Image (tube, rainbow, N blue to C red):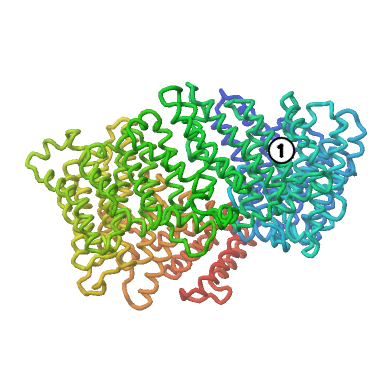
């Protein structure tokens, strides 16, 4: 290890042997669980932490007989070198990398492969660390050594080691797999670009040539030979390079960019750009790979194990990845190039999956399914990079049918296998089905969006229709088979949401042949509807009901898309593929939907409901109606054009059948809520999906509020005891829905009157109940707590539905219960669940009202919030007794977390008044200072905070989001907090600065920037800024406590120079550090001097001095806080960290 850095004189042999013995003993102790592992771990750690441990590590690597000791020595070289990189000489750096490479090559036949892999990884990491420093000559010297190994000049074992090193190197330069080095992201990005531009293609060619050099021997040999592992490693490296995130991602004209729909199966596009064309496309490389796999496959066709051996798996993965090759690597004016590439691949892959029935039978007889599944993955990759028409044409050059037909036959065979093997365990056919469904998704999603279904060939449509019929048959068989199973089978337990992904893929297949599949679904549904009607009281309907359940889910997905927050349009396939001259009554989709609505209407009959409509079937009915109504019911999209889309929208429009259907839907909803007590899933679907969806559209609300059935629902909500038994969350949603519907009334007065009539008596009940003289004595009774809880949730629901036209009534509603709420908070101070409901109601009410309130009303609300906060604090709600058991302590912390999070949300809502204010007197001089109120709230809440509570992720995020916002928007009010509250708030800021969540740290750095920049700007103008908080003061003991800015200047410098953090934070840290330095220049100079004095090495001391000087003066940095200056300082800090962070961490 010539040229390696030493610490003092060369260590004597005895000392080196002693160190090796200690490390060996520690490694042995860790493997023996009864030994003292803590002491052993400390010994191993000391080797990495020792300054310049290289001689000892070299000695251990070359002489130790304990493999784990050699592993730890390699790790110590890596850790020490990365830490001390800044003061290692260029010769030292090069010699370390050369030693690691030589060690790997010299011990290539070692049985301890993990040690070799570690040393190889260390060489790769050190090479990357010096990548931007080393000259082209230095790099070529390293790579010449690797090239000689990879070409097999030194034997098969060394060849294998060389390929493995390249695999480590590529992994290290890839952003997703690179090791942490404590350097900015820009460093890693520069390295990535450099390797991609100058070396990646070369590495690929080396791996290809290595594989070529051994394939003849592999084919000729009848037994396992060492060359097999070389070829396998070469394939792995080639696959790794193809998976690289290439910078050149532009697509050639006419090349599909792939589907953005969610997939169950992974498919990574390969887009290396035109520079790779000669290597990957035009050089015959793929033909060679397919021929090699085909030859080996034929040779070992009688050996069942071969399909799963490493070389076969690696070769297939590489072939499948080639199917994803796309982009500018193909000539834009030569479409045939890409098609020829895909055809060549498909011709080689087809034997893995065709004929499908024979392949399936072979797998059932014991053959490995891995090859067949890889064939399915190849089809998915091809489908992702091409269009349906091109996809279909590929196979027609060699077969009498297209690729779409093959895909249908293959999928059909998989579905048949699933039907035959009715197993609850996932088999190969489950995985094949998911991959093939993703293939259909890749092909059909772009068509479904664009409406270009005409691009699907006629032969493909016919095959698709047959496939969908088989899929439906399989689903109905599974449903029927589940009817009498007593166990908790997967089918029975599968929720609508869990099925959604698979059913969405089925829907795409159905839409590809919509003119056939809609009549099919109508026939199947009608048959089962008639079977129920004719067999009532004669035959058991259970199987039929399960089949109807399945049909409703499938049909709902076929005819309508999920809204995802927007009103979904009628699927393009339905708009285009039905005749435009049809009468509405004869439209296939009208017939299907009308049949289902008539069936659903039967649930209103008590006898039918009791015998047919189980809670499970009702869930499917409600789900279907909710999904269908979003697209078709009273849509505003209709126009005068006569086409399939307008026929459907007009038929279910407000001037035709829309009102009638709407009335049926409301009555079915009321039935679901009233007649199925305890069915939470059904009630959740009704409240959250169906009713909530109806009131999102104002033109539907206009008709809703005019319906007797809607008034029946409102009356039942107000007075029926049955609805008080609903889950409180469902009651909240129902209140929100009913209040939302007020937007359909003719004017604001009518809307406010409606809300008063709906909710007024509930507020009155709370007022009267809380005013009772004996309320405190009866409040804890269950029959009192239940209605109080329900009413609070209903009020919260109404408050969250607030909008301009109902704002007045909802403000009055909240105003009327202000005092009762405070009474309830006092009475139920030991009932954490009730306290939480109170806080959530207040949060919802304030959030909905604050932007609209005039100054006087704002003052009332603010004073009420003050009283609430004070009462919460004075009751010591949330304080945890140390005498509680562990389980009770955990529960108490959880309750406290929920309460305080609600209080933070309340403060955030109040804070929004200064951002969004619709009141007419928002600029009045007597307007309330919201910022002071919020800081007062923080003053009250902060004593209840603890660092343990900040470990709850959601609470932590809400707290720092609020704190960051306040300090950025209202820094001038921070001085109003007393010293104790201020210290508490800034203490949490210090906690957040060292949080593991990058977003939390970023918010804290933004807050520090706001504080420091405010103080600097104010003091520059001759004002006090943060005053005593920044200046520092003496504590009661007479000890001086430095100011907050001094404290955080130390913290940020400590973080940047000595701690681990995400490179993404460097810019935010720079923005915080600049104003901190400007505010505390003398402290910064002193800290810099201390760092310099602590550095014993004269060269490094000079280097650090220059770096500190450049940090605050380079690139014309000035003492201002404008945008340009921030950008300059970010650049300076990046350079500073790259230059000195490594050796500073060794001090």
Q: Residue at x 92, y 39 (%)?
A: 216
Near-viewer residue (644 or 954) = 644
Q: Is residue 899 left or right of residue 200?
A: left
x and y, in percent, of residue 63 in the image: 75, 34
Q: Position of residue 602 (x, y in %)?
A: 38, 37
- Identify the secondary structure beneath mark 1: helix
What residue is at 43 percent from the left and 43 percent from the top? 597
Which residue carries the number 1 mark? 409
Residue 1108 coordinates in the image, percent (x, y):
55, 66
Tell me: residue 113, above or below residue 703.
Answer: above
Quarter-of-image position of residue 446: bottom right
Within the image, what quadrant is residue 294 found in?
top right
Q: Is 941 placed above or below 603 here?
A: below
Using a 10 Å C-alpha cutoff, classify the residue at mark 1 as few (fewer than 14 neighbours), some (14 to 19) or many (20 or more).
Answer: many
Quick check: 490 left or right of 456? left
Say whether residue 895 is visible: yes
The residue closer to the viewer here, 661 or 480, is 661
Q: Identify the residue shown where x is 62% and y is 64%.
A: 1103
User: Toward the viewer: 1005 or 534?
Assistant: 534
Q: Is residue 1000 visible?
A: no
């Amino acid at each position: 290890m010539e040229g390696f850095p030493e610490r003092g004189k060369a260590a004597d042999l005895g000392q080196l042997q002693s160190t090796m013995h200690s490390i060996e003993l520690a490694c042995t102790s860790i493997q023996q669980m009864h030994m003292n592992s803590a002491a052993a771990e400390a010994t191993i750690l000391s080797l990495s932490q020792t300054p310049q441990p290289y001689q000892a590590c070299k000695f251990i690597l070359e002489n130790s007989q304990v493999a784990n000791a050699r592993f730890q020595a390699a790790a110590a070289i890596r850790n020490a070198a990365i830490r001390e990189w800044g003061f290692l000489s260029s010769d030292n750096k090069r010699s370390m990398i050369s030693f690691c490479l030589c060690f790997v090559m010299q011990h290539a036949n070692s049985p301890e492969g993990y040690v070799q892999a570690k040393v190889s990884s260390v060489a790769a990491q050190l090479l990357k660390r010096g990548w931007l420093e080393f000259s082209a000559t230095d790099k070529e010297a390293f790579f010449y050594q690797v090239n000689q190994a990879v070409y097999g000049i030194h034997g098969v074992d060394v060849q294998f080691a060389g390929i493995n090193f390249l695999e480590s190197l590529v992994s290290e330069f890839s952003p997703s797999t690179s090791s942490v080095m404590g350097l900015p992201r820009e460093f890693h990005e520069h390295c990535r670009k450099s390797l991609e531009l100058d070396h990646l293609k070369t590495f690929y060619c080396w791996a290809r040539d290595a594989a070529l050099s051994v394939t003849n021997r592999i084919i000729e040999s009848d037994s396992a030979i060492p060359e097999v592992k070389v070829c396998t490693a070469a394939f792995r490296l080639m696959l790794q390079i193809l998976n690289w995130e290439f910078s050149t991602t532009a697509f050639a004209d006419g090349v599909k960019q792939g589907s953005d729909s969610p997939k169950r199966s992974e498919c990574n596009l390969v887009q290396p750009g035109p520079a790779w064309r000669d290597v990957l496309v035009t050089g015959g490389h793929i033909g060679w790979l397919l021929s090699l796999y085909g030859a080996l496959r034929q040779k070992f066709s009688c050996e069942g194990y071969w399909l799963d051996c490493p070389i076969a798996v690696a070769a297939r993965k590489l072939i499948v990845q080639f199917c994803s090759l796309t982009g500018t690597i193909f000539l834009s004016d030569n479409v045939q190039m890409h098609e020829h590439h895909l055809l060549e691949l498909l011709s080689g892959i087809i034997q893995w999956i065709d004929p499908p029935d024979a392949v399936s039978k072979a797998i059932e007889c014991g053959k490995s399914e891995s090859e067949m599944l890889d064939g399915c993955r190849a089809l998915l990759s091809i489908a992702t990079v091409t269009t349906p028409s091109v996809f279909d044409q590929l196979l027609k050059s060699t077969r009498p049918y297209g690729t779409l037909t093959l895909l249908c036959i293959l999928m059909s065979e998989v579905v048949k296998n699933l039907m035959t093997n009715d197993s609850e365990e996932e088999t190969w056919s489950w995985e094949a089905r998911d991959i093939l469904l993703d293939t259909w998704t890749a092909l059909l999603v772009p068509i479904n969006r664009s409406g270009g279904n005409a691009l699907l060939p006629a032969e493909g449509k016919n095959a698709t229709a047959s496939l969908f019929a088989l899929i439906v048959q399989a689903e109905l068989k599974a449903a029927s088979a589940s009817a009498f199973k007593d166990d908790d089978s997967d089918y029975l337990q599968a929720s609508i949401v869990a099925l959604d992904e698979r059913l969405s893929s089925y829907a795409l297949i159905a839409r590809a042949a919509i003119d056939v599949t809609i009549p099919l679904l109508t026939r199947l549904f009608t048959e089962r509807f008639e079977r129920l009607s004719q067999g009532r009281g004669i035959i058991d309907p259970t199987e039929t009901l399960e089949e109807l359940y399945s049909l409703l889910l499938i049909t709902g997905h076929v005819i309508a898309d999920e809204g995802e927050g927007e009103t979904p349009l009628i699927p393009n396939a339905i708009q285009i593929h039905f005749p435009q001259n049809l009468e509405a009554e004869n439209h296939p989709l009208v017939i299907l939907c009308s049949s289902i609505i008539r069936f659903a209407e039967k649930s209103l009959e008590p006898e039918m409901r009791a015998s047919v409509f189980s809670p499970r079937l009702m869930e499917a009915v409600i789900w279907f109606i909710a999904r269908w109504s979003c697209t078709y019911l009273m849509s505003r999209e209709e126009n005068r054009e006569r086409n399939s889309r307008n026929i459907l929208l007009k038929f279910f429009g407000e001037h035709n059948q829309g009102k009638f259907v709407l009335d049926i839907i409301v009555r079915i909803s009321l039935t679901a809520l009233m007649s199925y007590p305890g069915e939470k899933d059904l009630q959740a679907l009704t409240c959250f999906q169906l009713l909530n969806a109806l009131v999102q559209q104002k033109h539907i609300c206009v008709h809703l509020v005019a319906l007797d059935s809607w008034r029946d629902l409102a009356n039942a909500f107000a007075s029926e005891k049955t609805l008080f038994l609903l889950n409180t969350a469902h009651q909240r949603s129902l209140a929100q829905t009913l209040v939302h519907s007020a937007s359909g009334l003719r004017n604001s007065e009518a809307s406010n009157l409606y809300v008063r009539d709906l909710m007024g008596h509930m507020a009155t009940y709370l007022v009267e109940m809380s005013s009772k003289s004996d309320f405190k004595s009866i409040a804890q009774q269950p029959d009192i707590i239940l209605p109080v809880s329900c009413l609070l949730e209903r009020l919260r629901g109404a408050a969250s539905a607030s909008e301009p036209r109902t704002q007045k009534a909802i403000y009055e509603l909240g105003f009327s219960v202000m005092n009762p709420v405070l009474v309830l908070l006092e009475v139920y101070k030991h009932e954490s669940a009730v306290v939480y409901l109170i806080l959530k109601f207040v949060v919802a009410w304030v959030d909905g009202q604050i932007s609209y309130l005039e100054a006087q009303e704002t003052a009332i609300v603010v004073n009420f919030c003050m009283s609430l906060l004070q009462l919460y604090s004075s009751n010591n709600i949330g304080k945890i007794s140390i005498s509680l058991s562990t389980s009770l302590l955990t529960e108490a912390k959880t309750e406290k977390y929920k309460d305080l999070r609600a209080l933070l949300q309340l403060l955030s809502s109040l804070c929004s008044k200064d951002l969004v204010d619709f009141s007419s007197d928002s600029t009045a001089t007597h307007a309330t200072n919201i910022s002071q109120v919020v800081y007062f709230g923080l003053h009250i809440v902060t004593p209840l905070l603890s660092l343990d509570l900040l470990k709850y992720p959601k609470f932590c995020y809400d707290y720092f989001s609020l704190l960051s916002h306040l300090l950025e928007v209202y820094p001038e009010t921070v001085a109003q907090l007393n010293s104790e509250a201020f210290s508490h708030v800034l203490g949490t800021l210090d906690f957040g600065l060292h949080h593991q969540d990058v977003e939390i740290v970023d918010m804290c750095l933004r807050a520090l920037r706001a504080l420091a920049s405010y103080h600097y700007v104010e003091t520059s103008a001759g004002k006090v800024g943060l005053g005593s908080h920044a200046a520092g003061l003496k504590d009661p003991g007479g000890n001086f406590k430095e100011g907050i800015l001094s404290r955080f200047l130390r913290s940020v410098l400590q973080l940047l120079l000595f701690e681990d953090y995400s490179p993404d934070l460097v810019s935010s840290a720079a923005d915080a550090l600049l104003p901190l330095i400007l505010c505390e220049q003398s402290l910064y100079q002193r800290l810099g001097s201390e760092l310099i004095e602590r550095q014993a090495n004269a060269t490094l001391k000079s280097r650090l001095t220059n770096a500190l000087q450049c940090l605050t003066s380079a690139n014309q940095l000035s003492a201002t806080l404008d945008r340009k200056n921030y950008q300059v300082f970010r650049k300076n800090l990046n350079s500073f960290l790259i230059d000195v962070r490594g050796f500073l961490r060794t001090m």
